[in-house]
């Protein structure tokens, strides 16, 4: 599976956009980029995923570069409740046997400050 | 839906004792995953099942660990005998093709082995 690299931590101001970068330079053509987050003392929570195109849902936006070697998760208006560890995961095609597996790295610890 | 249910939420036991962790996946989900989280090693996949059949148990640390899924609505992770280094938070997650293979995590079981 392709490896991801994320900054270990970052702060952002409440109400401002939070831009979380992720490098995945060895990603292959049929691998997806997934983002999960883990709020303290809870299980991880799915945020969003994408293959090539940018994606948006009610939680966040995902911007994937044209060469697919990096991506950015955008929380448009960060709130204190967005304080969590954010994991960027490269996942095999869902149609492969290994497509069910998620390999979590260290993630980025995001602290939203008032 | 109540989400993924895990029991117990907290378990404190003495070294050498048998520990059984339980998980009820979301109804209709056909994949179930067991993860372990520690400060040192982060979040690791131990084993996962598709349609009650173990698919990949390469993450199971050693023979002291075993997992079963006797039916679609119940799974157990057993540690026998337990050791202090098994102390961790154990998460169960479930998914289905209909959910886009998005994994839904339970609240976790915090295990302390004295």
Image (cartoon, grey):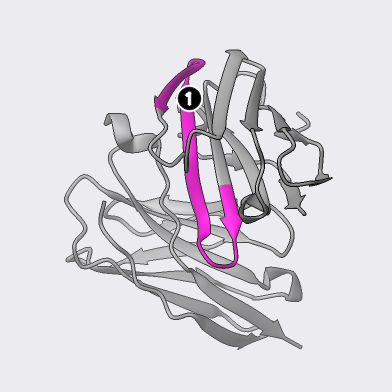
* Residue B71 sits above or below residue B60 on the image: above
Residue at the extreme top: B71
Is B25 within the magenta? no
Classify residue A42 by image quadrant.
bottom right
Is B45 within the magenta? yes
* Residue B107 sits above or below residue A114 on the image: above
Q: Nearer the viewer, residue B42 or B78?
A: B78
Q: Nearer the viewer, residue A50 or B110?
A: B110
Q: Which residues are magenta?
A: B36-55
Classify residue A90 by image quadrant.
bottom left
Instruction: Classify mark 1: residues with Cα within 10 Å, few (<14), some (14-19) or many (20+).
Output: many
Residue at the extreme front: B16
Q: Nearer the viewer, residue B88 or A69?
A: B88
Q: Main secondary structure of the magenta part?
A: strand
Identify the residue at horizontal 74%, vertical 60% (top origin). A41
Identify the residue at horizontal 20%, vertical 66% (top origin). A66
């Amino acid at each position: 599976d392709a490896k991801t690299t994320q900054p270990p931590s970052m702060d952002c101001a409440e109400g401002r956009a939070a831009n979380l970068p992720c490098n995945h330079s060895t990603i292959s053509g049929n691998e997806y980029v997934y983002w999960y987050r883990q709020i303290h003392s809870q299980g991880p929570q799915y945020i969003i995923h994408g293959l090539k195109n940018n994606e948006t849902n009610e939680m966040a936006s995902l911007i994937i570069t044209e060469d697919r070697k990096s991506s950015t998760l955008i929380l448009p208006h960060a709130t204190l409740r967005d304080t969590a560890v954010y994991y960027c995961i490269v996942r095999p095609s869902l149609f492969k046997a290994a497509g069910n597996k998620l390999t979590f790295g260290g993630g980025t610890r995001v602290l939203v400050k008032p | 839906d109540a989400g993924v249910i895990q029991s117990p939420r907290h378990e404190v036991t003495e070294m050498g004792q048998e520990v059984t962790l339980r998980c009820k996946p979301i109804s209709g989900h056909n994949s179930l995953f067991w993860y372990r989280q520690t400060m040192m090693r982060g979040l690791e996949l131990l084993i996962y099942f598709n349609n009650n059949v173990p698919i990949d148990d390469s993450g199971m640390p050693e023979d002291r660990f075993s997992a079963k899924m006797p039916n679609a609505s119940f799974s157990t992770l057993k540690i026998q005998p337990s050791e202090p280094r098994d102390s961790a938070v154990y998460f169960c997650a479930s998914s289905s093709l209909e959910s886009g293979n998005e994994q839904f995590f339970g609240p976790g079981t915090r295990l302390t082995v004295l």
